[in-house]
Amino acid sequence: MIALTTSEKKVKTLASSPTMKNSVSPLLVSILNQKGGVGKTMLAVNLSYALAKRGLETILIDGDPNRSTLVGARSIVYSEEVPLRVMSETASVGQTGACRHFLVDTKARPDPVDLAEIVQRSTLIIIPCSTKQDELRVTGSTVKLLDSVGSIKHRVVLNRVHPNNREDTLLSFKAGLRGQGIPVFDSVIRDYAVYDEAFGRGLSVGQLRGKTAEKAWTDIQQLLEEILRD
């Protein structure tokens, strides 16, 4: 028998708690950015697993034609009993049942019509962005597009951030974005190679072992906590 760590015991307790299952408002979280390669799929896979790990029935929807989410999460539901389903956007029509929680990995560079639909259906829109200047510029454009279609529920998360970045540097980046009127999560997702390992195996970093995996999983859980508090 595998011994559970303290954090795993806590998650197991939360997952079995009726209060936890019933107290979370329905979620439809869309993850988007006009720029590719910003880590949308990684966030979608790991956040959906983290939500399901708490015993909350979750559907992860792959809205991108390249089906990278289906690939990145292909082994999760076969390797562990968690209430998580993974399906394409077309397959999800009429097959969601009574599920109340959804993570959507949107297609790259959605046009204004797509954005308007995303805004209408989402309870939260997450915009992943690193501290690179080119990504920051495109993220600013993405926020302007969302503003133009009336979104008031989007927020940027600093993603794929170098682990050696100082905390004061990250605070400065977040302050700069907020100074432009861009809402930003306090949580930061650092760029660990273990994410690539997990993706290659079709798993979440929360299913891997090792110190780096634990650090990555802590980042994901902190972001989820922030999402659930809103």
Image (cartoon, grey):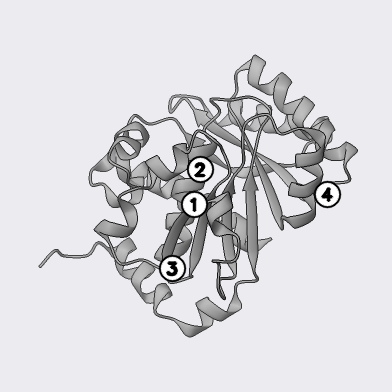
Instruction: State if disc 4 and disc 3 touch (CB < 8 Å).
Output: no
**Residue 23: numbered disc:** none
Which amino acid type corresponds to the residue marked 2 in the rendered image? Leu
Does label 3 or label 2 sit earlier along the sequence?
Answer: 2
Q: Nearer the viewer, residue 91 or 104?
A: 91
Task: Say what secondary structure mark 1 lies in.
Answer: helix
Position in image of residue 230 (x %, y %): 69, 60
Q: CA distance from mark 3 to mark 4?
A: 28 Å
Position in image of residue 150 (x %, y %): 89, 46
Instruction: State if disc 4 and disc 1 touch (CB < 8 Å).
Output: no
Q: Is residue 203 left or right of residue 33?
A: left
Q: Is residue 227 above or below residue 193?
A: below
Quick one: quadrant of the N terminus? bottom left
Residue with the mark numbered 4: 152
Q: Determine crowd level at label 1: few under 14, some 14-19, many 20+ residues with C-alpha closer than 10 A.
A: many
Instruction: State if disc 1 and disc 2 touch (CB < 8 Å).
Output: yes
**Residue 43: numbered disc:** 2
Does label 1 or label 3 sit earlier along the sequence?
Answer: 1
**Residue 47: numbered disc:** 1
Residue at 41%, 68% in the rendered image? 83
Position in image of residue 22 (x %, y %): 57, 80
Q: Nearer the viewer, residue 102 or 181?
A: 102
Does label 3 or label 4 sit earlier along the sequence?
Answer: 3
Residue with the mark numbered 3: 54
Which amino acid type corresponds to the residue marked 3 in the rendered image? Arg
Q: Is residue 74 left or right of residue 185?
A: left
Q: CA distance from mark 2 to mark 1?
A: 6 Å
Which amino acid type corresponds to the residue marked 4 in the rendered image? Ile
Q: Is residue 71 left or right of residue 51?
A: left
Task: Say what secondary structure mark 3 lies in.
Answer: loop
Which amino acid type corresponds to the residue marked 1 in the rendered image? Leu
Task: Say what secondary structure mark 2 lies in.
Answer: helix
